[in-house]
Amino acid sequence: MAGLDPKQAGRVRLKDKVCVVTGAGQGIGRAVARRLGDEGGKIVVAERVDESATRTTEELTKSGITAIKALADVSTYSGAQSLMKTALDAFGRVDVLVNNVGGTIWIQPFHEFTEEQIHLELQRSLHTTLFCCHAVLPIMIKQQGGSIVNVGSQSPRGLYRLPYATSKGGVIAMTKVLAMEYGRYNIRVNCVSPGGTAVNDMVTTRLTIKPGEVAKAPESEQYKGYREEMYNDIRNQQALKRSGTPDEQAAAIAFLASDDASFITGDVINCSGGQG
Ligand SMILES: NC(=O)c1ccc[n+]([C@@H]2O[C@H](COP(=O)([O-])OP(=O)(O)OC[C@H]3O[C@@H](n4cnc5c(N)ncnc54)[C@H](O)[C@@H]3O)[C@@H](O)[C@H]2O)c1
C-alpha cells in the first residue's frame, strides 16, 4: 500500500545520513525510523519510553541498520538539548531531524478543557518541535546543511481538539518561518500533515501524560459523542474514505528528508487521503 519497498527499488536516498526521529518507539515514528534506516540512514531512536525505544532500536539493529537509543523527554528545553548532544556524541553530525512527537490527548469542545489540559497539549504537540528545532539548528548551521521534517496534522480545520490544532498550526508556521530564515545555510524545513492514521503497535496510549502516568478520559455518553462526531467529520472531508498507514506517512517523510526534495522547502505535504 505504501508504494515500492525501498530496498527492492534499490533506493538508498539516505545513505550514511544521521537521522534523529523523535517518538520513534511506536506508530508513525517507528515506521519512519524503519524507512529511513532501510534507505541507508543511521538512526537515533529518540523516545521518552524505554520499552518501546528498545523495541525499535533492536528491530533496526537486527535488520543491519545502524541505530542507537536516545531516551529523552523532548517537551523540555533540556531534553531536546540532551538529545542532540547524544546524537552528536554518537555520530558527530545530524543530517535529518524528524519532529514526529505529538498527538491530541483529549477530544472535547474548547471550553471544557482545563488550564492543565491546555498546557499538556501544547507541551506535547508544540513545545516538542519548537525545542528540537532550536537544539538542532546550531549543529546544522555548522554543517552548512540539513533537512528538518516536521509532522503536522489536519486538525487545524477539525473539531474538538483546539489546543492540539493550535499546536499543529504553530508547527506549520514554524516550518515556513524556519525555511525562510535558514535556507541561507542550506537547511530545508518541510512538513508532512497526516490525516487519520491507524497505529496498531501501541506501548503507550495518547492519554499517557508521562511514562507511567495515564490521564482519564471522561466516560460520559456526551464525551463519546464528541469523538464520534470528530471521526465522522474527518471521514466526510476525505476523498479516499479510509485511514492511512504509518508506512504511507513514512514514505512522504522520507521523500522530504532526502535529496530527492533538494529544491523543496517551507512546504507542507498533506498525506491524508485527500482531506487537506
Ligand atoms: N495517528 C494519527 O492518526 C495522526 C493523525 C494526524 C497527525 N498525527 C501526528 O503524527 C505524529 C505521530 O502520531 P502517532 O499516532 O504515531 O503517535 P503515538 O502517540 O502513537 O506515538 C508517539 C510517540 O511519541 C512518544 N512521545 C510522546 N511524548 C514524548 C516526549 N515528550 N518526548 C519523547 N517522546 C515522546 C510516545 O512515547 C510515543 O512512542 C504526531 O505528531 C501526531 O500528531 C497522527
Image (spheres, rainbow, N blue to C red):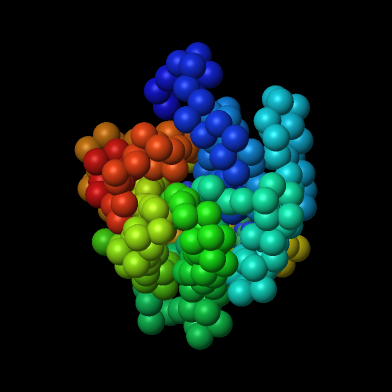
Q: In the rendered image, is residue 218 in sight?
A: no
- Please give the name of the residue rendered at 68% of the width and 30% of the height, measured from the top-left corner: 65
- Tell me which image quadrant ligand 1 sits in: bottom right
Q: Relative to 159, say whether 186 is above or below.
A: above
- Please name the residue shown 71% across and 25% down the image: 64
Question: Considering depth in this image, is 193 or 107 the residue closer to the camera?
Answer: 193
Residue at the image point whose x is 27% and y is 34% from the top: 240
| Residue 162 vertical position relative to residue 3 in the rendered view, above or below | below
Rendering quarter of residue 56: top right
Q: Position of residue 126 (x, y in %)?
A: 47, 69
Give me the residue at 68% from left, 55% from top. 88
Q: How many marks?
A: 0
* Rendered-image quadrant of the N terminus: top left
264 vs 163, nearest the viewer: 264
Q: x, y percentage for residue 220?
A: 50, 67
Residue 172 rendering spot, x and y as whole percentages: 34, 62
From the viewer's perspective, is 60 left or right of 19? right
Instruction: Name the residue at the bottom extreme.
Output: 115
Camera-side residue: 122 or 240? 122
Residue 80 vs 14, above or below: the answer is: below
Q: Is residue 81 visible?
A: yes
Q: Give coordinates of residue 5: x percent, y percent.
A: 48, 20
Q: Is residue 3 left or right of residue 129?
A: left
